[in-house]
Amino acid sequence: MAFTIPENLHPDLNPLAWLVGTWRGRGHGEYPDMERFEFAQEVVFSHDERAFLTYFSRSWIVDSDGEILRSGASETGFWRVQPGNILEVTIAHSSGSGEGWVGLFDGPKIQLHMDKSYAAPSSTPIDEGVRLYGLVAGELFFAYDVAVNGFPLQAHLWSTLPRVND
């Protein structure tokens, strides 16, 4: 599939142009205080000609056949490119938490480290996090390592998402 830079994309975002669009697929999750689970995920990166990408992710817990059992997590945010291949990302979660992330991009590989975290009084605070995004065999690969509830930083979520041609 040929890739073209989206029309009217702000020039600062050209290095992230490959992200723009809708991605859907499946993934897995686990953590010491929860059972391993499977999920379906949709991620949308869009733009409105300004110097940031808008990000939205939603998920559903699924069974081994991919049938939806219930809604999963949702998050939304903004991705901003800075000089030196630096990426600043803000994300708000449906669970009542929010985070600031800083990282580097190198072509279609993005690694982010959580800079700051906020949790509403009824939400669980995140102590540390690392996110990895990459284009692998034409699909968006996502991995999220997290430290929460007194556990050290470790793998929590990972998924592969083919691009959807709407």
Image: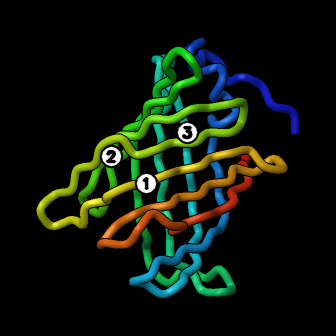
Answer whether labels 2 and 1 touch (C-beta < 8 Å): yes
Answer whether labels 1 and 3 touch (C-beta < 8 Å): no
Tag 3, which secondary structure? strand
Which residue appears at 51% of the width and 35% of the height? 103
Tag 1, which secondary structure? strand
Kind of residue sitting beneath label 2: Glu
**Badge 2: residue crowd in 10 Å (few <14, some 14–19, many ≥20):** many
Distance, label 1 to label 3, CA atoms, is 21 Å
The numbered dot on residue 129 is 1
The numbered dot on residue 99 is 2
x, y percentage for residue 71?
43, 73
**Badge 3: residue crowd in 10 Å (few <14, some 14–19, many ≥20):** many
Which residue appears at 68% of the width and 39% of the height? 109
x, y percentage for residue 35?
48, 87
Q: Is residue 24 above or below residue 17?
A: below
Which residue appears at 47% of the width and 18% of the height? 51
x, y percentage for residue 87?
50, 29
In terms of image quadrants, where is residue 135?
Answer: top right
Kind of residue sitting beneath label 1: Gly
Q: Is residue 62 above or below residue 117?
A: below
x, y percentage for residue 75?
40, 53
**Badge 1: residue crowd in 10 Å (few <14, some 14–19, many ≥20):** many
